[in-house]
């Protein structure tokens, strides 16, 4: 009888954990970006990158240090 109660307790804990976890998974993340981000074209290769990831150079923006070096050399 003791093992049946322990098994029921374990099942209850697992069920509670799964219910709580799946409820959290359904909620959207609080810090999800909802606004569009500004994109800039690399002055060397033309690929579009997020403005906050772009490298500002003397004659434009670049996607990487290598492209900045190649374009400004
Ligand atoms: Zn580039």
Image: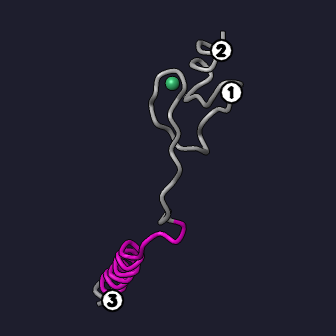
Asked if residue 22 is among those painted magenta in the image, a careful observer would answer: yes
Q: Disc number at residue 57? A: 1
Name the quarter where the N terminus is drawn: bottom left
Please tell me which residue is depicted at 61% across the width and 31% down the height of the picture.
61
Count how many numbered circles sit on residues in the image. Answer: 3
- How many angstroms separate mark 2 from mark 1 (CA)? 8 Å
Please tell me which residue is depicted at 53% across the width and 39% down the height of the picture.
40
Q: In which quadrant of the rendered view does residue 8 lie?
A: bottom left
Q: Earlier in the sequence, mark 1 or mark 3?
A: 3
Q: Which residues are magenta?
A: 7-31
Asked if residue 30 is among those painted magenta in the image, a careful observer would answer: yes
Q: Earlier in the sequence, mark 2 or mark 1?
A: 1
**CB of mark 2 within 8 Å of CB of mark 1?**
yes
The reply, left or right, for residue 33 in relation to residue 13 is: right
Q: Is residue 12 above or below residue 54?
A: below
**Front tag of 1 and 3:** 1
| SS of the residue under disc 3 | helix
Q: Judge: label 3 CB < 8 Å from ligand 1.
A: no
The reply, left or right, for residue 73 in relation to residue 42 is: right
**Front tag of 3 and 2:** 2
- How many angstroms separate mark 1 from mark 3 (CA)? 69 Å
């Amino acid at each position: 009888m003791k093992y049946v109660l322990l098994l029921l307790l374990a099942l209850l804990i697992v069920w509670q954990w799964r219910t709580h976890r799946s409820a959290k998974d359904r909620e959207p993340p609080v810090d999800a970006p909802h606004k569009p981000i500004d994109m800039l074209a690399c002055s060397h290769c033309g690929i579009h990158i997020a403005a906050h990831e772009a490298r500002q150079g003397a004659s434009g923006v670049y996607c990487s240090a290598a492209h900045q070096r190649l374009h400004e050399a």
